[in-house]
Image: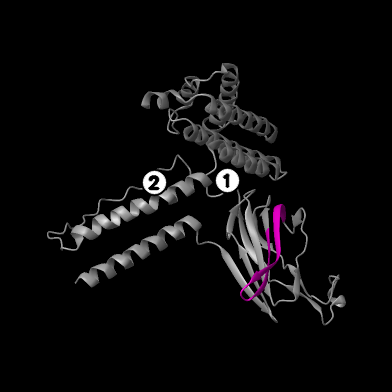
């Protein structure tokens, strides 16, 4: 009986570790492996779906026998439909199975839709040959080219599948769960042990997640950047352009309201425009001039968004572009104010 208890606790502990590890590192990576002669090529894309202007990583790892050299293409600023933000290359690292060469590109796309990472040519050169192959005609017995297969990637629009606050979600009925009338002996110690293990494992995972989570200001400015791209790529037809500009304005308004709720505890997204502006007015800040500038910009943005939403006010691209600048500057100022002094609700909790 004691052996069964230890086995059960070990299995439970292993399942908990696997579950939290998958949540921490994600499971939506795309991996491909290619074999070419004595070379093994591993291709990894960090995700299968990204948002416009959201960075992701493409990594190639090539393992070759000792005495071979791997050369990767040099993409300085552009890789097909993707912009190259950063790249890192490690060559000729010793491993148990040969020599490892690795390259990682950080990419982003300003275009939404179903895109494709094109085939990437890799030159594998024998150590006896010092010059890289310029084309497939230059390949001799000492060097050859290998091309990876194309990989599809979904790039979502910044305003795609955005939640509509006017639509109330359905509330499901309560489900009755039977309560056990008698507990077994092993439950008296296995449940507290599992609870303690959960707390112990949650602490480092929570710390890692907290460290990797971007600040509210960085998140909001990244979101506004994507929305500005959406506005710039709208249709030239005046009627469609007006409708698209109104959608982008509503997204800018929602982003700023959500930012305020994330940055300051006395602000909530359920507040009216007047209540939200009053909460920002009550923030403690040494540079009151900057706060007043931010409030004026927020007032201009919220008033225009409310008029477009409730009164049907027509908004063109120039108006939305001006309001976007006000929103971006207001977030910048409020981000600086947040580092000067805490908001009143935080002071009251100390």
Q: In this rendering, is residue 280 above or below 186? A: above
Residue 249 coordinates in the image, percent (x, y) = 60, 36
Q: Is residue 127 left or right of residue 157?
A: right
**Is residue 214 among the parts visible in the rendering?**
yes
Q: Label 2, label 1: how many angstroms apart (C-alpha)?
A: 20 Å
- Asked whether 297 falls inside the magenta stretch, the response is no
Q: Main secondary structure of the magenta part?
A: strand
Residue situated in front as seen by the camera: 220 or 112 = 220
Quarter that holds the N terminus: bottom left
Q: Residues within 10 Å of mark 2 (few under 14, many from 20)?
A: few
Pick the front one: 122 or 189: 189
Instruction: Please state the extent of the stretch shown in magenta in the rendering.
Output: 82-104
Residue 30 image position (x, y, % from top left): 58, 65
Answer yes or no: is residue 304 visible: no
Q: What residue is shown with label 2?
A: 169
Q: On the image, numbered disc 1 is attached to which residue?
A: 159
């Amino acid at each position: 009986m004691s052996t069964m208890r230890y086995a059960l606790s070990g299995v439970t502990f292993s399942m908990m570790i696997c579950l939290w590890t998958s949540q921490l590192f994600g499971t939506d990576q795309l991996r491909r492996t290619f074999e070419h002669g004595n070379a093994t090529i591993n291709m990894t894309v960090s995700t299968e779906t990204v948002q416009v202007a959201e960075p992701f990583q493409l990594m190639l790892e090539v393992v070759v026998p000792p005495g071979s050299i791997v050369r990767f293409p040099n993409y300085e600023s552009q890789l097909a439909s993707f912009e190259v933000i950063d790249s890192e290359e490690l060559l000729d690292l010793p491993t148990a199975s040969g020599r490892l060469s690795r390259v990682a590109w950080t990419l982003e796309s300003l275009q939404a839709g179903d895109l494709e990472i094109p085939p990437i040519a890799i030159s594998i050169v024998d150590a006896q040959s010092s010059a890289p192959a310029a084309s497939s005609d230059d390949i001799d017995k000492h060097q050859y080219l290998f091309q990876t297969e194309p990989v599809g990637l979904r790039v979502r629009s910044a305003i795609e599948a955005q939640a509509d606050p006017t639509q109330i979600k359905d509330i499901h009925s309560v489900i009755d769960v039977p309560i056990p009338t008698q507990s077994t002996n092993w439950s008296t110690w296995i449940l507290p042990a599992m609870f303690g293990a959960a707390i112990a494992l949650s602490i480092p995972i929570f710390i890692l997640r907290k460290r990797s989570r971007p600040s509210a200001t960085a998140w909001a400015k990244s979101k506004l950047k994507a929305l500005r791209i959406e506005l710039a790529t709208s249709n030239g037809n005046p009627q469609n352009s007006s409708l698209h500009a109104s959608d982008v304005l509503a997204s800018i308004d929602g982003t700023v309201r959500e930012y305020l709720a994330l940055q300051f505890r006395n602000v909530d997204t359920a507040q009216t425009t007047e209540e939200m502006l009053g909460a920002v007015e009550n923030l403690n800040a040494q540079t009151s001039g900057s706060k007043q500038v931010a409030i004026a910009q927020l007032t201009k943005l919220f008033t225009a968004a409310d008029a477009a939403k409730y009164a049907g006010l027509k908004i063109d691209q120039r108006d939305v572009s001006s309001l976007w600048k006000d929103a971006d500057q207001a977030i910048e100022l409020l981000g600086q104010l947040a580092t000067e002094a805490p908001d009143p609700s935080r002071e009251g909790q100390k």
